[in-house]
Image: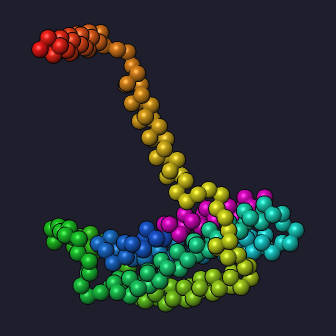
Amino acid sequence: MAREECKALLDALNKATACYHHLVLTVGGSADSQNLREELQKTRQKAQELAVATRAQLTAALRDRGLGAEERAEFERLWVAFSGCLDLLEADMRRALALGTAFPLHAPRRPLVRTGVAGAAAGVAARALSARSLRHEAEGDFDVDDQRELEREILQVSEMIHDMEMKVNVPRWTVQARQTAGAELLASTSAGASSVGAVSVQERTGPCDPSKALAATVFSAVLLAAVALAVCVAKLS
């Protein structure tokens, strides 16, 4: 039961981390806005909550001395996957901090990254003066406060990773995977090749065309006659 709970938590953490990574890639671009920064804040906080819950479950399981060998191996694999997920989350948080510092929300000239998209000045101004945009302008210190909070959260994640390594010693190179690297890709590739091969064999071994068979027979007969005539000429000469 604990193993299934750990798997569910780790799956949710993977999804939250992937979502956060996708959002970080848009910071500083034409789609950047306070809405994006707020979504980044919510997503990384959700990921950290899931990380804390996952760490607690895995730590309790791996420190249980009565755990069987097979179950321990499975929990160690989950632990390695969890460690890798935390490393990616920390790296993306550091990237978000760097991009947020380089591209502040309320810079004098925005957007700082031009995508080539342009429109009528009146239409752009009308969209910019929406009620939501005005509220965001009134909250001009959001990005400053969020950057400070992000710095603290990066330190918390780094401490979590260090604490994990101190409490549970599971070297990554000692954990064996249940399947070879790229097994899913190889399986899909072999399946595609098998289907193509089956089609090719079916095409080669399909019903014979009578007209093609007759033409092949006539050509063989003419070729044999020509060979026989050449042999006779050679003997007579």
Residue at image coords 52%, 57%: 182
Judged left or right of residue 17, residue 196 is left
User: Can I make out residue 86 in this image?
Assistant: yes
Please tell me which residue lies in front, 83 or 227.
Answer: 227
The magenta region covers 1-19
Residue 8 falls in which quadrant of the image? bottom right
Using the image, determine if residue 147 lies above or below residue 50.
below
Please tell me which residue lies in front, 207 or 99.
Answer: 207
Q: Position of residue 90 (x, y in %)?
A: 53, 80
Q: Check if residue 12 falls in the magenta segment.
A: yes
Q: Which secondary structure class fits the magenta region best? A: helix
Q: Quadrant of the N terminus?
A: bottom right
Residue 15 falls in which quadrant of the image? bottom right
Using the image, determine if residue 18 lies above or below residue 202.
below
Q: Position of residue 100 (x, y in %)?
A: 39, 83
Q: Check if residue 214 falls in the magenta segment.
A: no
The furthest residue to the left: 237
Please tell me which residue lies in front, 207 or 10.
Answer: 207
Using the image, determine if residue 145 lies above or below residue 63.
below
Judged left or right of residue 24, residue 130 is left
Q: Position of residue 43 (x, y in %)?
A: 52, 71
Q: Position of residue 136 (x, y in %)?
A: 38, 79
Residue at image coords 42%, 28%: 201
Please tell me which residue lies in front, 47 or 81.
Answer: 81
User: Can I make out residue 35 in this image?
Assistant: no
Q: Quadrant of the C terminus?
A: top left
